[in-house]
Amino acid sequence: MRTLGTMFRLLGIGASLALAAPAVAGEPVVLPDVTPGATSDFALAYMLQQKVQVALEREGQIVLTTDAARPIVGDALDQCADVAGCPFAALQQLPASIAVVIRVSRADGAVHGEVSIFDQGGTKALEVRHYIIEPGAETAFAREVAKLTSDVFSLRSPAPADEIMQATKLVKAAEARTETPQTAVVPKPAEPAPAPAPAPAATPKPAPAPAPRDFSGMSFEERLADTEVAPRHIVGSKHNFMKSNGDPRDWVFKSRSHAGRVIIDVRGGYGFGDIDRSADVRVVVDADGNNTSEWLQEGPVQSQRVRAGMFVGYAPLTWMDAGILVGMQYSQKQLSTGWRRQGDPTGREGQANPVPAVTIDLGARVRLYPVPVGIVKPYLLVGGDARFFDAFHIIDPTNPPVDYPDPPGGVVPGVTGGGGLMFDAGPIVGFYAEGSYTYHFGLRSSPAELGTKPPDAPPPPASIHYTVGVVGGVQFRI
């Protein structure tokens, strides 16, 4: 939708601009030449450069390559991934607000691609992604880069029309410089006197790329230097990290480490057990309609209902996180009422229709990950729970008038244990399934009564003192 909006704005500029624009007008993006990790990677970097450029253009973007930007910024974009501060200075001069900087290298027999997205606002990357590029998957890597760039553009305002026009002119000028005039037919001029051949211009050779860093002999602090990986992201699995002898960014990507991050879970599922609440109320009235005796009982009953919740916590270690869980357990309230005149052996009774209700579960959770490194992580959980439920609100009859007492709300404490399986789709997002068992105790975990029990009182609600939860959800790590 952003590309279409930009096209319509360009049409408003005039027919001359429409003729000068590329076939698909989009957002200007700076794409410096892919930086190779070693001189032997130049061919690979060149191939990836072409594929990423094509993928971006298919997404509708206006791609300002190093050649297109050179008339304005000179060599400021050369070896951009290895130059501190690049591409900040170039973005201040070019008609584009976003730059995609890619570095490709080989390590442990695999090809690694590091993609960094920058904008004009600072020298720190907005987004950094690390990919392992399998043989034959170069086109898929290019599509991932193009999709990531489009996602970044979707969160920003469209580029001004004059910026798009300037970017288009730079792209056209670069294309004109690389085209060879083979089809043009011009009259053959008279042959001038032969002139001495000019000396061939010296072709500047690109500066050799720095050799890949050898991490095997470095200390822990030296390995983390200039990688944007903090020590807190490794606490709990330092031995595994040091044993890897690789780039810390690759280790974080492969291990999907949770350490040093705020954890936010959004969850939903079902609860089985003491879910609903049931109450019975009986009163005895005198000839004037005043209550002379009141009795009520209230307690949990078995059911199965939908539940939802959110967990917010922190992972101080790769193998542990802890936090607070706020959940909503949907339930129903069941109510029976009855009254009789003082001195009469029998009276009237009634059963109300069940009404929906929501109980609030507030709990503390600690999760332990026996396998803290990798994409799939099983875990165990323990914690405490407090379930809050509100009072019954009885609509008293008016013919004859009877004043029923309302069964009060309360809190049911409990202890929880269980386990689950986490699938970390990426370093900052995961999906999980979980099962838990909560044992309820305390006065309100069982049927409770108040007042003088009548001889014809109904039996108490049947409670089982536990709830089993089966939930799934998505986890975000900040």
Image (spheres, rainbow, N blue to C red):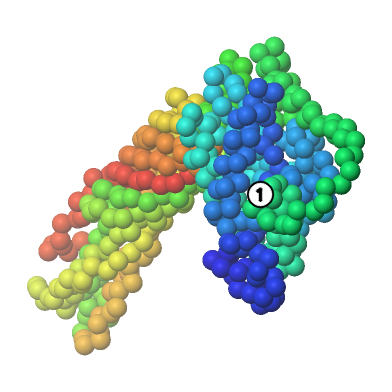
**Is 415 on the left-hand or right-hand side of 336?**
right
Q: Residue furthest top?
A: 217
Residue 100 rendering spot, x and y as whole percentages: 67, 45
Left or right of 244 on screen, residue 467: left
In the image, what residue occupies the spot 41% across and 49% down? 267
Amino acid identity at mark 1: Gln
Report which quarter residue 295 is drawn in: bottom left
Residue that appears at 69% across and 33% down: 35
Does dot 1 land on a helix, a strand or a loop? loop
Q: Nearer the viewer, residue 401 or 88?
A: 88
Residue 261 vertical position relative to residue 5 in the rendered view, above or below? above
* 187, above or below 223, in the image: below
State the quadrant of the N terminus. Answer: bottom right
Can residue 447 be seen in this snapshot?
Answer: no
Q: Is residue 381 left or right of residue 257?
A: left
Viewer-side residue, 330 vs 341: 330
Q: Which residue is mark 1?
A: 182
- Single out the residue that lies furthest toward the left: 345
In the foreground, 456 or 89: 89
Residue 377: give x, y in percent of width and height.
43, 30
- Bin the neighbour count of mark 1 within 10 Å (Cα to Cα): few under 14, some 14-19, many 20 and up: few
The picture places residue 396, in percent across and down from the top left corner, at: 28, 79
**Does 113 appear above or below 25?**
above
Q: Nearer the viewer, residue 376 or 401?
A: 376
The quarter of the displayed image where residue 209 is located = top right
Residue shown at the point (82%, 51%) measured from the top left: 190
Residue 331 rendering spot, x and y as whole percentages? 30, 59
The C terminus lies in which quarter of the figure? top right
Can see residue 284? yes
In the figure, is residue 203 to the left or right of 148? right
Residue pictured at 21% horizontal, 86% vertical: 400
**Residue sticking out furthest to the bottom:** 399
